[in-house]
Image: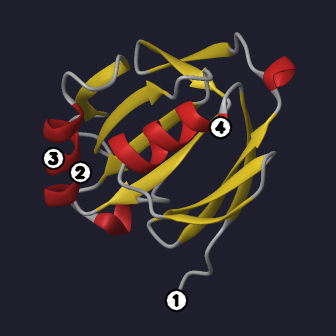
Amino acid sequence: MTLSPFHLAFPVHDLAVARAFYGGVLGCPEGRSSDKWVDFDFRGHQIVAHLAPDACGARANNPVDGMGVPVPHFGLVLPMDEWQSLADRLAGKVDFVIAPYIRFKGETGEQATMFFKDPSGNALEIKAFADRSQLFAR
C-alpha cells in the first residue's frame, strides 16, 4: 500500500526558533515560507509552522501504559533501526516528555516510542514496531 503524505499546520511562537528545531535538530528540509509560516518536509509529509504565539501553551496529558502522553501530538512511525538512530541523536538535544522505551512489552502492539516537545510546546511522538503489521493490531 502506498501512503499519501499528510499535511499538518501547527502554531509556533517564533519562526526562527521553529526553523532551528525542525530544520536543525530534526533535519527536516525547508520548503516554501513567508513571514508568517514555514513548510517543512517531515519525511515526505508536509508540516507547516504558523506564527501564532497566542495559540501556543500548555496542553493536556492522557495516561497510557502508566505514562502521561501529551495530547494533542503528532509524529512518525519509523523502522526500528531509524528510530534507535534518531533516539540516540536526540539525546541531549531535546527534553523528552517520555524518554525512549518499549511500550506494551510482550503484548499486541509492542512498540518503541519517545515523546518530546518543540520549543513552542507542540508534542511529537516517534515510534517503531519490530513487526510493523502490529500498527493497527487489537
Does label 3 or label 1 sit earlier along the sequence?
1
- Distance between the Cα atoms at labels 3 and 2? 4 Å
Does label 1 or label 2 sit earlier along the sequence?
1
> Relative to 57, does residue 138 appear above or below in the rendering?
below
Residue 84 bears which disc, if any? 3
The part of the image, by quadrant, that contains residue 43 is bottom left
Amino acid tagged 3: Gln
Please tell me which residue is depicted at 41% across the width and 21% down the height of the picture.
Answer: 65
Position of residue 112 measured from the top left corner of the image (x, y, whole percent): 26, 41
The part of the image, by quadrant, that contains residue 25 is top left
Element on which disc 1 rests: loop
> Relative to 17, does residue 39 appear above or below in the rendering?
below
Does label 3 or label 4 sit earlier along the sequence?
4
**Quick check: marks 1 and 4 in contact, CB under 8 Å?**
no
- Distance between the Cα atoms at labels 3 and 4? 28 Å
Please tell me which residue is depicted at 86% across the width and 18% down the height of the picture.
Answer: 54
Residue 83 bears which disc, if any? 2
Amino acid tagged 1: Thr
**Quick check: marks 3 and 2 in contact, CB under 8 Å?**
yes
